[in-house]
């Protein structure tokens, strides 16, 4: 009778380990998604900060480069000066937005069902500041 129950402990351990690993991978994936969410918010903030301090009304590529330093997945970003068509001396502020950002799951089960999760748009508005005069960071424009 004992030889029929010999592998039961191994099977129970394997099933328990599978459930535990799925739980841990789910927690890690959710933490990565929250990190990406926070990094997208921070990237829009940093892009808007660079745009208002450095006064680059025509240099959207430089704003995008600042944003990619924090979140490499950013492909395109929208930089809108308020009011539209203003010059460096007449602009009141800037809005920087990220749209079309997707999150890639790493968990094998969730990744097979939903490989890309679309994230909402992220946006930051900052009022215009005096060009290249940031009391907290002299190197932001370099």
Image (cartoon, grey):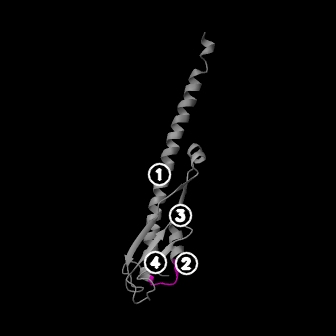
From the viewer's side, name the closer residue of 87 and 13. 87
Can you tell which of label 1 and label 2 is closer to the viewer? 2
Cα–Cα span, label 2 and label 3: 18 Å
In this figure, which residue is indicated by the disc labeled 2? 61
Q: Residue 126: x percent and y percent?
A: 38, 76
Q: What is the span of residues highlighted in magenta in the rendered image?
A: 54-62
Can you tell which of label 2 and label 3 is closer to the viewer? 3
In this figure, which residue is indicated by the disc labeled 1? 31
Can you tell which of label 4 and label 2 is closer to the viewer? 4
Please identify the quadrant where the N terminus is shown: top right
Q: Which mark is residue 80?
A: 4
Q: Earlier in the sequence, mark 3 or mark 1?
A: 1
Can you tell which of label 3 and label 1 is closer to the viewer? 3
Check the image and name the residue furthest to the top: 1
Q: Residue 6: x percent and y percent?
A: 61, 18
In this figure, which residue is indicated by the disc labeled 3? 100
Q: Residue 30: x percent and y percent?
A: 48, 50
Residue 84, image quadrant: bottom left
- Within 10 Å of the Cα at label 3, are there few (<14), some (14-19), or many (20+) other Cα atoms? few
Q: Earlier in the sequence, mark 4 or mark 2?
A: 2
Q: Earlier in the sequence, mark 3 or mark 4?
A: 4
Cα–Cα span, label 1 and label 2: 30 Å
- SS for tag 2? helix
């Amino acid at each position: 009778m004992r030889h029929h129950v010999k592998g039961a402990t191994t099977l129970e351990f394997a099933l328990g380990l599978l459930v535990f690993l799925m739980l841990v991978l789910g927690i890690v994936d959710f933490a990565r998604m929250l990190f990406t969410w926070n990094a997208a918010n921070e990237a829009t903030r940093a892009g808007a900060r660079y745009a208002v301090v450095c006064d680059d009304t025509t240099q959207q590529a430089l704003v995008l480069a600042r944003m990619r330093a924090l979140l490499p997945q950013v492909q395109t970003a929208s930089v809108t000066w308020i009011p539209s068509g203003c010059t460096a001396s007449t602009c009141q502020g800037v809005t920087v937005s990220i749209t079309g950002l997707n999150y890639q799951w790493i968990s094998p089960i969730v990744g097979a069902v939903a490989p890309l999760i679309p994230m909402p748009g992220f946006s930051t508005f900052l009022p215009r500041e005096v060009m290249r005069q940031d009391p907290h960071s002299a190197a932001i424009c370099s």
